[in-house]
Amino acid sequence: MNSSDVSLDIGAKVSKVEYAELTDVALHGTEDSVSIEQNDKLLSTYCRKVDRRILLYATILCILNQSDRGSIGVAKVVGLENDLGMVKNDFNIAATLFTVGYLSLEFFSNFVLKWVGASRLLPTLGILWGVVCALQGVITTKGQLYAMRILLGMSECGFTAGILLILSFFYPKHKLTTRVGLFYLSSPLANVISGPLASALSQINHPTIKRWQWVFILEGVITVAVSILGYFVLQDHPEKCKFLNTEEREFIRRYKHREGTLGGSQKLAARDVFQVLGDWQVWVMMGATFAACEACGSVSVFAPELINELGFTAAQAQAMSALPSACGAIAMVFIGRFVRMCGSHWLAGTSALATVLIGSIMMVSTLNVPVRIIGLCLTGTGGFAGLGIFPGWNITANSQSVAASTVASGLTVFFGSSSGFVLSNVFINSDAPRFAIGHTVNIGIMVLGITSCVVTRISMGRRNRKLRETRFGGEKVFQFEY
């Protein structure tokens, strides 16, 4: 990356000459001299259309997805364990079983999406997990809760990876990172909204339906209603998109073909998939994603319990659990500027994980309430900032083929969700109120995540030099963006 590069989006850099060629060829199919401003206008119009339809809907549905998934944390502090006779680490088992169900089918979900189509698969998944979420409100035993958590995980798997994949179909590479970051903004927003909302729902007094049951039932019903709209909103890829006109479809087809990232209508070859899976750099990149998701999970699922153990009431804990997520949401809004300030994804990501590291050290070092609340907010800030960086980086840096995009988006969600295995078994009731084991494990994972960023940066720099050395004349070659 040199000084002749111009930053066109958060952290993604494309040379002025290359950008002009991309837009000229996209509009006219040749490299005739055409105003870059004219092409910028057409690209901006196209992106706004996709933003208003696909990105906005995906973000809303993801807020419901995160809220439904994390509602068990709220239910716990308003009587779930007592009513179901759960003792010791039964709750942690329930949280772990969700991850088991989620990961059981996750890796294969994007291959199914390519076959079935996003417009049919993703709304169906939303309806399924909404129904399962609501059914959690009618269970009477912990065995039934275990079964529901497995089914909830299985019904949710494929949604996030599927959204990441279709975003890579619709957006040019230099626009993708920002959109992925905006999509992941739904995660802290879900916690900000669901904390006070669940607190209000849990105050409902009903002669037969208990407070924690209302949380599950109403959130599930809302999800089903919103998911049905997906059949009319979501599109499979730009070439078949109904809300784009002919000029816009042809423009983006040529544009993405020129940058080598068009994948919506391309076939997925098994040989290409195995080639990507054999690339060690792809796997190393996932370490940072794992670390960020571990931090986010600490806030999303266990924040109400962590705050409750500090001496606050259940209602106060639910409402205050929104605070660290609010810090994370603010961080994600400004993460684009921070990436530009750092000049790279890897350095910004390293800083985000270092923030979590500091927060975890604060929480494991003392039981002082103000200090631990600040530590929890730092964890939310760094974790969600990392979530705004790493998934987009993973996909942008591996967008040279449809196989690379499919594998990268699938592995991103797979590794992110795998953090639930660790998370569910280190924040245990017997370790309250300090939760030293959980915070210590988080410290170690953040160190591994930072190491992953550094190793990836070194590897990408070396690969880019080799790619430039092997090109012929003015031939353009794919370059990893770090």
Image (cartoon, grey):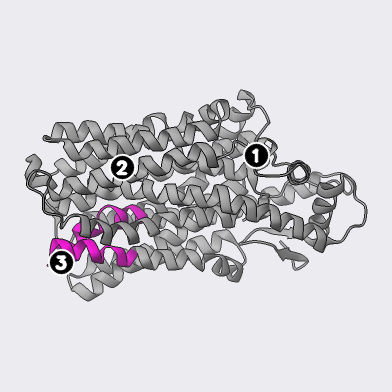
- Mark 3 or 1, nearer chain start: 1
For the residue pair 54 and 72, the one nearer the viewer reads as 54
Q: Quadrant of the C terminus?
A: bottom right
- Residue named by callout 1: 242
Confirm or deny contact between disc 2 and disc 3 (CB under 8 A).
no
Q: Residue at x 56, y 30 (%)?
A: 117
Calculate the distance from the C-alpha at mark 3 to the C-alpha at mark 1.
53 Å
Q: Residue at x 83, y 59 (%)?
A: 17
Q: Residues within 10 Å of mark 3 (few under 14, many from 20)?
A: some
Tell whether position 385 is magenta.
Answer: no
Q: Secondary structure at mark 2?
A: helix
Would residue 380 be seen by someone viewing this image from the given angle? yes
Confirm or deny contact between disc 1 and disc 2 (CB under 8 A).
no
Q: Identify the magenta region.
A: 295-324
Q: Residues within 10 Å of mark 1 (few under 14, many from 20)?
A: some
- Residue named by callout 3: 310
Residue 312 screen position, x and y as percent: 14, 67
Res 163 label: none
Calculate the distance from the C-alpha at mark 2 to the C-alpha at mark 3.
33 Å
Res 221 label: 2
